[in-house]
Image: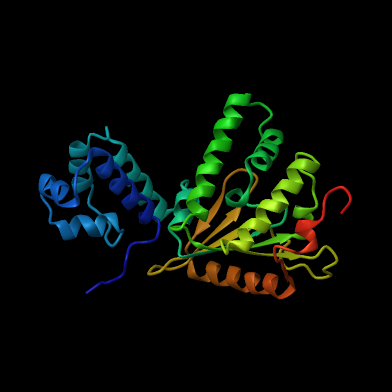
Amino acid sequence: MNTALPSAMWLPFGARILRARSDKGLSRAELAANVGVTDDKLRDVEDAYCRPARSLVERVDTVLGTEHRLVDAWAITLQAEAFPNEFGDMRELGVHAARLWEHQPMAVPVFLRTREYSSAVLRPRHADLSHEEIEAMVEEEMAHRAAMTGPDGPTLRVVLNESALQRPQGGAEVLNAQRDFLADLIEAGIVTLAVIPEETAHHPGLGGAFRMMEFADRPSMVYAFAAQGGELTGDPEQVGRCAMVREAIEDVSVELTPRSELLTARWPAG
């Protein structure tokens, strides 16, 4: 008997069904009865303990009136499981992790940014977009931050290059407020944060930014960031190599506290 669970990529899909059902005002038992399955079967779909058949998703789509969006999401997730490099809903996947570790050499991660810092990072990267479009992207980042740092988010561990907290992205006021915000998150126990000092002679993280996601009952996954998009994999060999890099990064990192000078000093004075 094969007891292997589907990959973690199905967690966002299950959550999508749960949200659609809640929006419709149906209990799980009511929806299950309407689509011809047991309550236990629907729970397994929503909790990503099984990979649902397309025919079931089509019936759920019809009952919930989601206009084929659930079927489309099912097809995208199925393809993503087979070809993980093309999985696009990385942010939502991260929310479902039990533990998330991330190395960022250039900037503060999306889920730890202040609104002003987010805007200061996005505007130069998207100079062709209007103010309204940038603001919409900032709102998305803030919603993602709320999910990641909320009570149901993963345990967060981040290692930055020291320069990421010295670069005055957006100016002195923006950088200093971002430092204060990180100090508050550390104080509240929401994230643990470390830096790789600039004088590190043998920097193990020069391969670029990457994220490791560990799940309660599924294999770990790694996302390697790129200038446009990135690469997601659950391949055990690649995950294992990234775990070794993570250990090397941790070995040379310096832990930050809310009172660390790197967070309390005011730019440009320090």
Q: Residue furthest right?
A: 269
69 is higher (above) or lower (below) than 105: above
Using residue 179 as the reference point, say whether residue 35 is left or right of it.
left
Residue 37 visible in the snapshot: yes
229 is higher (above) or lower (below) than 214: above
180 is higher (above) or lower (below) than 117: below
The residue drawn where x is 58% and y is 37% is: 138
Q: For the N terminus, give its image quadrant.
A: bottom left
Q: What percent of the width, then of the height, locates residue 204?
A: 73, 68
The residue drawn where x is 31% and y is 37% is: 69
Q: How is the image coloured?
A: rainbow
Q: What percent of the width, then of the height, locates residue 175?
A: 75, 46
Q: What percent of the width, then of the height, locates residue 180?
A: 70, 52
The residue nearer to you, when weighing 113 against 14, is 113
Q: Quadrant of residue 212?
A: bottom right
Q: What percent of the width, then of the height, locates residue 104?
A: 67, 56
How many numbered badges does the structure rendering display?
Answer: 0
